[in-house]
Image (cartoon, rainbow, N blue to C red):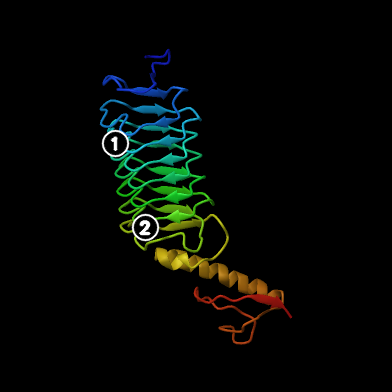
Amino acid sequence: MMAAEEYYIYTGGVVPRHVTRVRIDKSITVIPARAFQGHPNITELDCHDKVEKVEESAFYLCRSLRRVIMPGVKVVDQWAFWKCEALTIVECGKLERIRGCAFSSCISLRNINLPSIKIVEGSAFCWCKALMTVKFGDKLKTLNGRALYGCRALERIAIPLKDGMITHDNIITGCEKMKHVDLVEEELHETIAALLLEEWKKDMRRKIDALNQILDSSHYTCRKGRGCGGEGRCDTNLDHKCSTQYH
């Protein structure tokens, strides 16, 4: 049925081919698998905040889809938005899990903000060639292989660093323009080496140098003494972990 705002109110079943704007009915809390697969004309999806899941291939190959508003969705299943080539706006403030290839080949997507995300599975955003910035929140636990593979325009990501969070060293393979990594938490973790970002390492060294100056002025000393030459200074080797105590 058509609402006054010219949205098609989706209550289930087959969506007519002429529909361009879709609003999910209050009775729907899960968008079922392949519900809109291959629909040629849908440009907008508007979900109410009780929709919690988008199932497998729900919008697979919806090449005209440009705008997705899903404020309550927590899980997006595999291939859900695969090759939605016009997609530029995704609002998903409560999204916790993105399954494999969920947004793969969304070649017009430029920015994504995922404040509640916990798990990003393999190839979730691979070949999103226009993607420039990605912001993960501090709840992120797992970032799987090829998650951002081939995102050639990607320049900046914000990410919390947690031991064991990054499972493969090909997360950003092919991200030729990557220049900046913003730390969501002010901690240094072993996962830095896994990302192979020289600029990131240099930034960490600068932070350690600044810390050393503070330690000198506060008369700290290195408890273990390794790499400090007995002078209470931690060196700038990222592999060196040194705890401190007062004289």
Q: Quadrant of the C terminus?
A: bottom right
The residue that appears at 42% across and 55% down in the rendered structure is 143
Judging depth in this view, the residue of 198 and 21 nearest the camera is: 21
Occupied quadrant, residue 87:
top left
Q: Which mark is residue 60?
A: 1
Q: Quadrant of the N terminus?
A: top left
Pointer 2 with pointer 1, Cβ within 8 A: no
- Which residue ends up furthest to the top in the rendered image? 4
Q: Which mark is residue 223?
A: none
* Marks 2 and 1, the one that precedes in the sequence: 1
The residue that appears at 50% across and 65% down in the rendered structure is 203
How many dots with numbers?
Answer: 2
The residue that appears at 42% across and 31% down in the rendered structure is 30
Judging depth in this view, the residue of 231 and 244 nearest the camera is: 244
Amino acid type shown at disc 1: Tyr
Residue 82 relative to residue 196: left or right: left
Does dot 1 land on a helix, a strand or a loop?
Answer: loop
Judging depth in this view, the residue of 130 and 1 nearest the camera is: 1
- Which residue ends up furthest to the right in the rendered image? 247
Q: Tell me residue 65's x, y (percent).
A: 33, 31
Does dot 2 land on a helix, a strand or a loop?
Answer: loop
